[in-house]
Image (tube, rainbow, N blue to C red):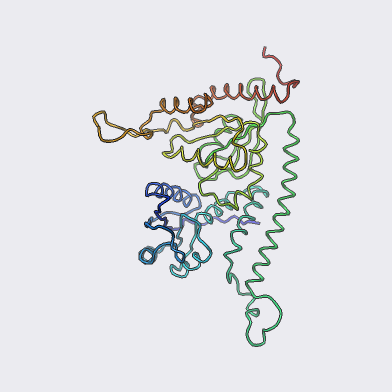
Amino acid sequence: MIEQKNLGFEKAILIGIITNTQDEDRVNEYLDELSFLTHTAGGTVSKRFTQRMDTPHPKTFIGSGKMEDVLAYVKMHDISTVVFDDELTPAQQGNIEQLLKCKILDRTGLILDIFAQRAKTSYARTQVELAQYQYLLPRLKGLWTHLERQRGGIGMRGPGETEIETDRRIVRDKISLLKKKLVGIDRQMATQRGNRGALVRVALVGYTNVGKSTLMNVLSKSKVFAEDKLFATLDTTVRKVVVRNLPFLLSDTVGFIRKLPTQLVESFKSTLDEVHEADMLLHVVDIAHPNFEDHIESVNSLLNDIGTLDKPTLMIFNKIDAYRPEELDEDDLVTERTTKHYSLNEWQQSWMARTHGDAIFISAQHKTHIDELRETLYQKVREIHITRFPYNHFLYPEG
């Protein structure tokens, strides 16, 4: 199983490339996110490097000139970790390690590391471990030397495995073992979901660090772990919530992120099963984030991948207390007015029109408009409840 280790802050630098598909603003935004990920994993970012390229260099991801700049900086400032914004091929990772002589991580490796830190239950740990082994398999090289005798040469010829083949076999065996274990746990969790009886199921979905767990705590009056860090939640938490006379189940799920590694989506299938089996989704959005519309798009595309985009959805725009539009002077005739200059009222009108009224603006931390949210939830869940369980005794008239 994954051992939890608490290490001191490591000095890191970030590297991203500007291509035809992602312009400078987009790259800076990705690097901001990568910086937050690095901080969450326990690192401090010393510097960022970007380079304009049509396509990444097949051997070293960035050009040789930029690599020399990076090497000089690493030596001068005693940097222990270099993080790349995109996934590196095993060959690129090996080449860069040889050049820089320090730890090389890509976005996928970093996310996996955070997941390993955050996984609390046996189930989440098994999922993370599987994803880590799948990531490690193509990147195996002489990680240990206890099989020196199997290197070949005089007196060593004949049948047998080389060290790398043995490593690969051990990892493949481990992967198949973990997959079997997950199948068993999946069956167990499906049984748990089936035992929840005649209650409407509502799932909180959204980008990472938008306030899903804080909202869960406010609605269910429980104490789910919530923190201003990416991926504070990895384990699905289900709570029974009663609004007026109507009980329903509310589940808090793992947050989504752009460029989420495919092996993670695979191994977190059961977390997404909660979303799959929900009768209604609450899509939480951090409106204070400058690129929250991109986040909505990312979440919707993942929901589309797992076939749940057509479920009844209520858009919840959280953190309205932290929203600050960009100022635009009245006498400024040059700057074009864009969505960055929208006031909260303008966003409200825009999203109310887009979602046909299924949008609500709140602050979970300061409990602003929470009563309004409870009322909207009550009406929505009641509609589903009446159609799903028409003879249910919960819906006695309110007296």
The image shows residue 301, relative to residue 19, as above or below, that is above
Q: Residue at x 65, y 46 (%)?
A: 269
Residue placed most toward the observer, 31 or 143: 31
Residue placed most toward the observer, 119 or 167: 167
* Left/right of residue 226 with respect to residue 186 in the rendered view: left
Counting from the top left corner in percent of width and height, residue 336 is at: 31, 34
Counting from the top left corner in percent of width and height, residue 115 is at: 57, 51
Q: For the image shown, how many numbered marks are present on the structure?
A: 0
Q: Residue at x 41, y 39 (%)?
A: 290
Residue placed most toward the observer, 13 or 180: 180
The image shows residue 142, relative to residue 276, as above or below, that is below
* Residue at the farthest bottom position: 154
* Left/right of residue 342 with respect to residue 389 in the rendered view: left
Q: Which quarter of the image is occupied by the N terminus?
A: bottom right
Residue placed most toward the observer, 100 or 160: 160
* Residue at the farthest left position: 331
The quarter of the picture where residue 82 lies is bottom left
The quarter of the picture where residue 4 lies is bottom right
Counting from the top left corner in percent of width and height, residue 293 is at: 46, 37
* Left/right of residue 202 with respect to residue 330 in the rendered view: right
Q: Residue at x 43, y 38 (%)?
A: 289
Q: Which quarter of the image is occupied by the C terminus?
A: top right
Counting from the top left corner in percent of width and height, residue 145 is at: 61, 74
* Residue at the farthest top position: 399
